Image: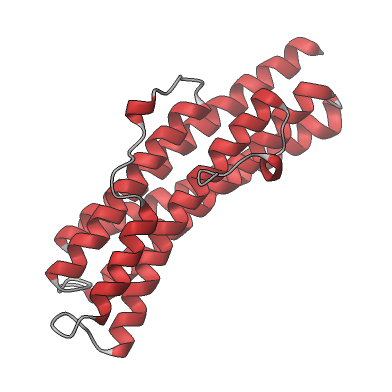
Amino acid sequence: MRTQFTAELIALTKDLTLMCTLAHDAVERVTDALVGADLTATYEVFALDEQLQKMYGACEARTVVLLALQAPVARDLRHVVTAIQIAGELSRIGWLASRVADQVYRSHPGHVASQPILDILAAMGQLAAQRTALAAQAVSGQAQSEEQTPAARPMETLHQQLHATLREPQTQPSTEVAIDIALLGHHLERCVDHTARIDRLIRFLDTGVPPTAQPTDDE
């Protein structure tokens, strides 16, 4: 029974690692779509999100079976619960990338914004992709050095810069377009929020300290 449980946990971890790869690819490709008004990249994001949602459903089903049939305790229970929560965070990253891709699709053949604004959105997408890659390393158990963490131009700064640029007379779009652009920025910012949540879940798995009891990056 224990051997079967261990095998199921290994399979679940492999599924999470693959989901991390899919989520990273989705964010990376949606950034390419934004920068180049690339319809091919846009379609790829839709396909990646579809794969992510299917895998999330499969992970959810696997964890239900583990909880129902194996009745894990202590760290094993923490492992299973953490896994399904991480899968949920990755699923949301895919959904957010798909929403950004949808805006690129609706704006095609033009870009979603003018160049100064587009540069900020591209930087937000690149940062989100970096954070997703780091989350993938954490899920797979790879140690991270401080040098790996992209500290320059954090997402909050980029978000503030985006809103400031939207208010500048020389770059200010129409109200409707400005709302759409602000929503794109929000989606990309939320991707990073979900990677931070994954980091806290990994620490919970390692230490047993609940995510809500852990210090935030600002503390």
Is 16 placed left or right of 2 in the picture?
left
Residue 117 visible within the image: yes
Which of the pair 219/55 is nearer the observer?
Answer: 219
The percent coordinates of residue 102 (x first, y second) are 35, 68
For the C terminus, the quadrant is: top right
Is 104 placed left or right of 1 in the picture?
left
Name the image quarter holding residue 85: top right
Q: Is residue 29 above or below residue 62?
A: below
Task: Single out the residue that lies furthest toward the top.
Answer: 3
Task: Single out the residue that lies furthest toward the front.
Answer: 219
Q: Is residue 88 above or below residue 1?
A: below
The percent coordinates of residue 153 (x first, y second) are 29, 50
The percent coordinates of residue 176 (x first, y second) are 32, 87
Residue 46 visible within the image: no
The structure residue drawn at horizontal position 16% and vertical position 79%, both measured from the top left corner, is 171
Name the image quarter holding residue 34: bottom left
The percent coordinates of residue 20 (x first, y second) are 45, 37
For the N terminus, the quadrant is: top right
Which of the pair 147/72 is nearer the observer?
Answer: 147
The structure residue drawn at horizontal position 54% and vertical position 33%, both measured from the top left corner, is 16
Which of the pair 99/49 is nearer the observer?
Answer: 99
